[in-house]
Image (cartoon, rainbow, N blue to C red):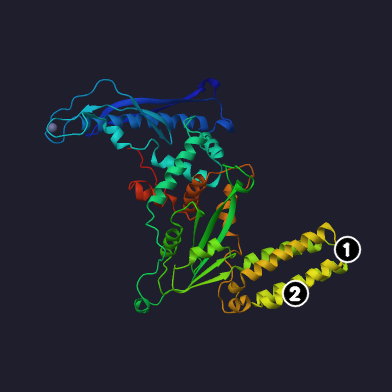
């Protein structure tokens, strides 16, 4: 074989057929050239693939738009030809495969009917948004999982969208999608319990209890006029059925006008019945406690065991810092912390609090160092925490033995999963309350794997799953 066969040339064309199957036009899309085979030029390069997609997109869209405008050229009322109104502004439309500038022809309305305006653009009426649904879905999905900047980088790298997107457009689109989701939420109510006790008894026997974990966290605010105003509170929750199916929700506290409705809809989608037992678990914060009131007549509220152990773990680490292994106070503190945990596990807050105060006295009696003071402070906080939430502390050990839930956070805390990973991992990230709230509406849909479903509701022909392409004849 001689070397004269190189370069190898492969032409890619698009053939446009008429209704009857005749060839109407042939468009040259690309010409691929290859030299002797090397690993790096086997098959398409990313740059070639991007070019190909962009060219095919342009050709396809041109055909679709021409066809559509031809259909619009006649009045549907009387069939008369509509008059065109001079030169037209291009309509800019962003798709997965490039930014399109569509010829948005304007027509004069036919006189056979009355119209508010003299002219109209059929394309502008059809494409009310300027981003294609599939690009919008992908943008918002990525942006809910990583920063707006990174979302732009990744989409630009793999799709032929050039510089048609930037962090600001992505953010605006996320906000728009979040707002659209929020708009579908029904009105807020104080009480979500319908009917009376007699009605509830008539309901079919409900499933096993639903468990709902509620948690609060703080996000850096972008409007900071004082140190104290630098943060705002976000509440996140997860509802788990007895089979383990879970759904999450989140909102910015004091910004969201429908927090109860939001929680109620999640519970309803999880199949909650009025006569069903619902266990709310939280770290006892008052805001969170308010939210779950009047949600269900069979609701109980307990302090999530996770939040107790988390605090004890922090204090254990501090106790270990008091001295080397074998150091008397260190060992004493560790032993008493273990006892506190054991008392609380059995719902015995009285003895737990008593042990806390004994431990405080023991530490106080030693030569007080900075480390001693820090642990004392933590013990003070813990004492107040247990006192304030004593009414929410059940006998965890007994619940555990009966197979009842004691925590929703054994795997991972909801607030960390829903909020922290996207919004607090970098201290310098700052948020507006609105921006954070809307992003959370998208993010919870993505975490529940429901974003595409949501888009399908809005755009009925939106493709849910990847489908194999039909082969050309
Ligand atoms: Zn007409």
Q: Which residue is mark 1?
A: 367
**In the rendered view, would you say 157 is above or below 369?**
above
Element type at mark 1: loop
Q: Is residue 245 something that shows in the picture?
A: no
Element type at mark 2: helix
Horizontal arrangement in the rendering, residue 296 relative to residue 25 (left or right)? right
> Who comes first in sequence, dot 1 or dot 2?
2
Viewer-side residue, 68 vs 458: 458
> Mark 1 near mark 2, Cβ–Cβ under 8 Å?
no
**In the rendered view, would you say 143 is above or below 117?**
below
Mark 1 surroundings within 10 Å by alpha-carbon count, few (fewer than 14), some (14 through 19), many (20 or more): few
Q: Which residue is mark 2?
A: 355
Disc 2 CB within 8 Å of nearest ligand 1 atom: no
Horizontal arrangement in the rendering, residue 91 relative to residue 110 (left or right)? right
Task: Examine the image and state in which quarter residue 307 appears.
Answer: bottom right
**In the rendered view, would you say 126 is above or below 88?**
below
**Place of residue 357 in the rendered image (x, y in percent of width and height, measured from the top left):** 76, 72
**Place of residue 36 in the rendered image (x, y in percent of width and height, measured from the top left):** 56, 26
């Amino acid at each position: 074989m001689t070397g004269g066969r190189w370069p190898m040339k492969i032409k890619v064309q698009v053939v446009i057929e008429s209704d009857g199957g005749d060839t109407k036009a042939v468009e040259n899309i690309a010409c691929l050239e290859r030299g002797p085979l090397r690993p790096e030029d086997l098959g398409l390069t990313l740059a070639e693939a991007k070019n190909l997609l962009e060219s095919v997109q342009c050709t396809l869209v041109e055909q679709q738009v021409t066809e559509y405008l031809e259909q619009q050229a006649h009045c549907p009322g009387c069939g008369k030809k509509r008059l065109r109104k001079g030169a037209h502004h291009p309509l800019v439309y962003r798709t997965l495969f490039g930014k399109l500038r569509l010829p948005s022809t304007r027509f004069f309305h036919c006189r056979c009917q009355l119209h508010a305006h003299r002219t109209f653009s059929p394309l502008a009426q059809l494409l009310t948004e300027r981003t294609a649904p599939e690009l919008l879905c992908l943008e918002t999905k990525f942006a809910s999982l990583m920063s707006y900047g990174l979302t732009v980088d990744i989409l630009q790298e793999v799709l032929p969208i050039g510089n048609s997107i930037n962090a600001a457009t992505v953010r605006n689109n996320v906000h728009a999608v979040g707002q659209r989701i929020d708009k579908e939420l029904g009105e807020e109510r104080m009480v979500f319990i319908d009917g009376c006790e007699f009605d509830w008894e008539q309901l079919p026997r409900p499933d096993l209890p639903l468990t709902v974990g509620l948690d609060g966290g703080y996000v850096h605010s972008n409007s900071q006029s004082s140190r104290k105003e630098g943060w705002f509170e976000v509440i996140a929750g997860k509802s788990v059925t007895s089979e383990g199916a879970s759904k999450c929700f989140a909102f910015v506290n004091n910004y969201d006008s429908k927090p109860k409705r939001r929680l109620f809809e999640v519970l309803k989608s999880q199949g909650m019945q009025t006569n069903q037992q619902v266990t709310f678990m939280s770290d006892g914060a008052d805001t969170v406690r308010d939210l779950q009131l009047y949600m269900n007549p069979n609701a109980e509220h307990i302090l999530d065991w996770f939040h107790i152990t988390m605090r004890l773990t922090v204090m254990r680490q501090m106790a270990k810092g008091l001295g080397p292994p074998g150091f008397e106070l260190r060992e004493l503190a560790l032993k008493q912390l273990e006892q506190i945990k054991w008392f609380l596990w059995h719902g015995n807050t009285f003895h737990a609090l008593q042990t806390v105060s004994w431990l405080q006295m023991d530490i106080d009696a030693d030569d007080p160092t900075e480390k001693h003071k820090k642990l004392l402070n933590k013990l003070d906080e813990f004492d107040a925490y247990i006192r304030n939430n004593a009414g929410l502390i059940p006998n965890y050990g007994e619940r555990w033995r009966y197979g009842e839930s004691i925590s929703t956070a054994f795997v991972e805390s909801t607030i960390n999963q829903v909020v922290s990973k996207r919004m607090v991992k970098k201290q310098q990230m700052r948020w507006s309350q609105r921006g954070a709230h809307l992003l959370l509406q998208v993010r919870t849909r993505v975490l529940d794997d429901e974003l595409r479903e949501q888009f399908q509701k809005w755009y009925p022909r939106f493709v849910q799953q990847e489908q194999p392409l039909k082969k050309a004849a």
